[in-house]
Structures are given as structure tokens and as C-alpha cells.
Amino acid sequence: TKDRIVTSNGTDYKTIVVPGCKLMPAATLTKLAHLANKGAIVIFVGNLPDDVPGLGNLQARRKTFAKAKKSVQAKIGKRYVLVGDDTEKMLAEAKVRRVSSVDYGVEFIRRRYKDGYYYFMTNSSAEAMDGWVDLGINCKTVAIMDPGNDNRFGLAAVKQTDKKLTKTYLQLDPGESCVLRCLDSDKLDAPRWKYRRMLQDGDAVTIEGKWKVAFVAGGPVLPDVCETETLSSWTDFGGEETKRFGGTARYRINFNKPTAKAGDWLLDLGTVCESARVFVNGRYVETLFSIPFKVAIGDYLRDGENMLELEVTNLAANRIADMDRRKVNWKKFYDINFVNIQYKPFDASDWPLMDSGLLGPVRLIPLVDSEVVWQSI
């Protein structure tokens, strides 16, 4: 409709990219030919498919396939069908607008709504994203929403490219995600997004001292309370109970707030196996369940001594392996054939121990607001 392909959820596209393949169902190629006849642009990477898969009703399907392929071939070179090995070149020829975040390893999903677009952005690379991103659209307002960090929300810095497209400034650590709300109007009442930068890495303060570790939920039994000055997997604490334990342990330590001047303090938990609920001075901050295990806690700190509590939960793998070693009948399912990936009886008794708990190091990193972003517009 209107030269666009509309999916069942209302998202629209103008171009279909078909990965290289030798076999394709006749119905699929027929549909692609139909879309090309309606004005959609279809890009075949490599070559057109050669034949249909399977042997059932072969001659009839080949006849339908040949008819569809002839229709597709008639559109090659006439803008609607492109065939070749250079995908980027063909996308440019199809005038597909490029979102430059992919150059930084930041992937996205975009959805069109009546008042603009929504982008879900996630940094799947090993490097931090800190720079301007060409969104490939023209909008007047971009708001950043971070549901994982105290529901932060604010207006992003934006500027226009020479092609009258919108750029916005984005900061994402590896593994971090956010939602961008891109509006056609400039009537969104919200504060400016606070862009932050770290001070020199040497200014980070490692929280050191005696950690009190209490196992608070899980099984098969709760290991004894212990103390440690060296963070490591709780499977190394000694005894069989910590090795087979699956559940939650509470880590507690007192520390002094650093005296350095900072606009905020970023708590970096280092390595966590596998999730952590963060409390500062008895106040809940956030639950961290994926990298980066970082959260700003400046609003929760007080001068002098502070208390940090982390409720860390591991995976159930060590407990499952232990039950299989002891021949515990835990696979009590009414309607499932419990097998492994090779469709053989599931048995975890030979699984190696998995690291569990807080491995750290736990650091406080000073942050300052960055006005350079706004000054560069």
C-alpha cells in the first residue's frame, strides 16, 4: 500500500532483502514477484534461486516457480528487483536510508507510530558508543528512555544532516539498551537528557574491606554465613553446600563515600553470576541482570559511611547437576519428554561447576555532566 509493504503489526518497509539461496518455495517467489509488481523493491543477494525444495508435486511447483522467476527477471535493472553481491551498494541504489549506529555495533528495531517513530537500541559490541548517530529519518524531537536505570527520561541532543535527516547523540555501554521516541513535533515537555562522562579511570575507587555473605534463599540447604575480603565465586568458599547451592546470597559491606567532587557516582559491580538487586543505605536502587552491571547511586549516598547490600542470585545449573549426581528424581513433568539436545535422557551429572555470586571488582566511578554535546549542536 502506497509503495510500502505493511506487516501484520502495522510496521512498514519499502525493501525486502533476500539472502543468497539455491532453493525457494514457489509460493515465496510468487509473493516476491507480486510485491515487486506492486512497487516494492526486492534485493536478491548473490543470484536468484534455482529450484524448489522437496519432491512432492514437483512438476506443478516447478511450473509455478518458473513463471514467478520469469516475472522477477523482467524487473531486474528496472529499480524494482536488484541482484548482486554488494548488498550495501544495492541498498544505496534502492535509496534505503542508513542508520549509522550499526557502524558502532549498536543494533536497533524501529517501529512507526502516528506521531513518529520508536527505536529500541542495544549495544551488542565490546566497545562503548559515545557519539552522534544518523537515525535515517527526519524528526524534530528525540527523547531517550532508559527503563533499566530508574526510568530516566529526557530530551536528547539533535541536529540535522545536510540531507535534512536527524542526528542524535547516544551513549551506550556494551550490553546496554535504551528506547528512543522520535516525534514529528517539538511539543514534548521534558528535561534535557543528562549526558555524562567518566573522569579519568584512575579516579575510580575500589570498594574494599570485609564482605559479609549470608545465603538467604534457595537450596538444597542454606550454607553458613561467612566473611571474605576477596571476592570470588561462592563455590570456592569451601564445603560441598556452596558448590551445589542454587539461590540468593546477600553481600553486605560498609564503605566511606569518596571525597572527590563528582556530579554522580556510578557503581560498577564487575562480574556478577548472574543477577543482583542493589540496595544502598537500606534503599532499593535497581535489579541488574545483564551486562553492564552498573548503576548510578549518587542520590543514595551520604557523606561519611555508607552501607552497600547486594542480593546476588546464581543459575540453577550447580543444583541441577548435584541432584543428578545424587539420583534425585526431580524431573517430575506431566506432559514433557525430558531429553537433552541429542534427544537422549537428560543428565547433568557431568556438568562442571559454574561460577556463582559476586566476583567483582566493585568500584565507584565519578561522573560529571557533559555540556560538550549541547555546545556542538
Image (cartoon, rainbow, N blue to C red):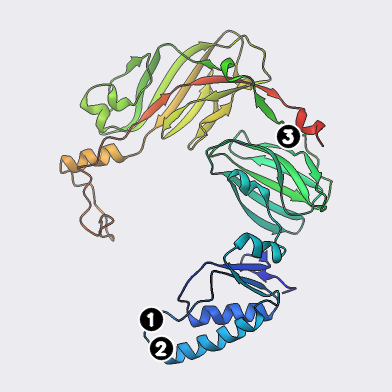
Report helix, strand or loop for mark 2.
helix
Q: Which residue is drawn at 43% across and 27% down?
A: 311
Q: Residue at x 21, y 57 (%)?
A: 344
Q: Kindly identify which numbered label has been placed on residue 58.
A: 2
Compare residues 16 and 157 and report the one nearer the observer: 16
Residue 214 quadrant: top left
Q: How far apart are marks 3 and 1 (CA)?
A: 56 Å
Q: Where is residue 137 in the image (x, y as percent from the top left)?
A: 75, 54
Report helix, strand or loop for mark 3.
loop
Res. 47 in view: yes
Number of marks in the rendered image: 3
Residue count near mark 3 (Cα–Cα under 10 Å), binned few <14, some 14–19, many ≥20: some
What amino acid type is highlighted by mark number 3? Trp
Q: In the rendered view of the protein, which quadrant contains the N terminus?
A: bottom right
Q: Kindly identify which numbered label has been placed on residue 193.
A: 3
Q: Earlier in the sequence, mark 3 or mark 1?
A: 1
What amino acid type is highlighted by mark number 2? Leu
Which residue lies most toward the front here? 85
Above-or-below relation of 258 to 149? above
Q: Kindly identify which numbered label has been placed on residue 54.
A: 1
